[in-house]
Image: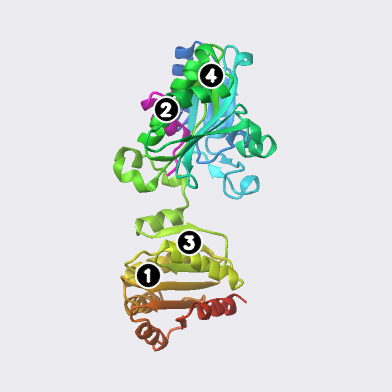
Amino acid sequence: MNLHEYQGKELLKSYGVAIQEGLVANTVDEAIEAYGKIKEKTGSGFAVVKAQIHAGGRGKGGGVKLVKNEGDLKEKADAILGMMLKTPQTPGGMEGPGKLVKKILVAEDAYVPSPDECDEFYVSVLMDREKKCNVIIYSTEGGMDIETVAEETPHLVHKEYIDPTLGLQGFQARKIAFNLGLNGKAMKEMVKFISSLYKAFVGADASLFEINPCLKTGDDRIIAVDCKVTLDDNALYRHPDLAELRDTDEEDPTEVEAKEYGLNYVQLDGNVGCMVNGAGLAMATMDIIKLSGGEPANFLDVGGTADAKRVEQAFRIILKDPEVKAILINIFGGIVRCDRVAQGVVDAYKNMGNIEVPIIVRLQGTNADVAKTLIDESGLAVKSAILLQEAADLVKEAVA
């Protein structure tokens, strides 16, 4: 689950991480009020207005603006609120439709009063699945796309692996600060920053914390100017307060609907919808579709309770995609019997009326032969298969 910048910063602050202070606003009037509070606190008329969407690169699309006075703030807040912001990370990139900006963050200008004395760093914490431990990735090249830095100047990207049993050690935090070229007060501040950041990462059951830029101010403070936070969905049951921060307006509406039905669904760009029980089988099914000449239109795992109601809901979600030219249902009957799934497919088909796209059903496992008979004798335009190759051939025929 992704958080907005202002939500991520509040989470970091609760763990003692120093942040660029700011206030969120939903309207221009709220933005003016927030600006007044920021100005009163900092004593400076400079502030930053940031669009709040779940995507990076907001500055490239005009979603981050520096303001100098209230009139400037009003003009730029009005321009950003309600705009369809396009960034390299919004759907379709800079050529796509963009995302509607409903909230803005009015934040202090952390570079005042001595921008020339500030330094920008990159710091992130995430899981390294290959090494089975968390890793802190950091670089002196903050404010830039880390992918570009890693490709063009890989020696400037450092990694510090954290033993899952011991956790982050003091010498590791000091090593990070040293490699970033810091000393004196700035080094002590960075050690504190890294320690608090890692504590927040573990405490929130996060899968990603990305601070870019992490700023050394003119007076040697270390603060998070921007942050990207992704929480582990599987751990949200332990954090009901964080689960409430979910902004479904920023997510794919079809995926949100699927989640309400207990379906694991991810939208893709292909032409063959797939309905499967089990994530591993779903991945194999997507491979089958590609080998047969098609492209998977989605990942959809119905789980172990593929009854008529759940199958019907899965059908409706898949058919929301106008690019779907065929549907492959691939079920392994272990916990759930194949004949039960087959009956669910038949009942769902009848309830939904005429479904124009071809449907291929491959059932293997408990009562697979009974299931095939049920489908073959249903009188519906549904093709059945038992072998994987049969299903692949039928998919190829359907999309040809």
Disc 3/disc 4 C-alpha distance (Å):
43 Å
Q: Amino acid at mark 2?
A: Gln
Residue 158: x and y in percent read 57, 32
- What residue type is disc 3 on? Phe
Kindly identify which numbered label has been placed on residue 169: 2
Residue 51 screen position, x and y as percent: 53, 34
Q: Is residue 40 above or below residue 229?
A: above
Looking at the image, which residue is at 62% across and 46% down? 93
Q: Which residue is tagged 4?
A: 110
User: In the image, which disc is placed on residue 299?
Assistant: 3
Tag 1 and tag 4, C-beta contact below 8 Å: no
| Residue 356 part of the magenta segment | no
Residue found farthest to the right: 152
The nearer-to-camera label among 1 and 3 is: 3
Residue 43 position (above or below residue 292): above
Pick whichever of labels 2 and 3 is earlier in the sequence.
2
Residue drawn 35% across the image and 34% down it: 203
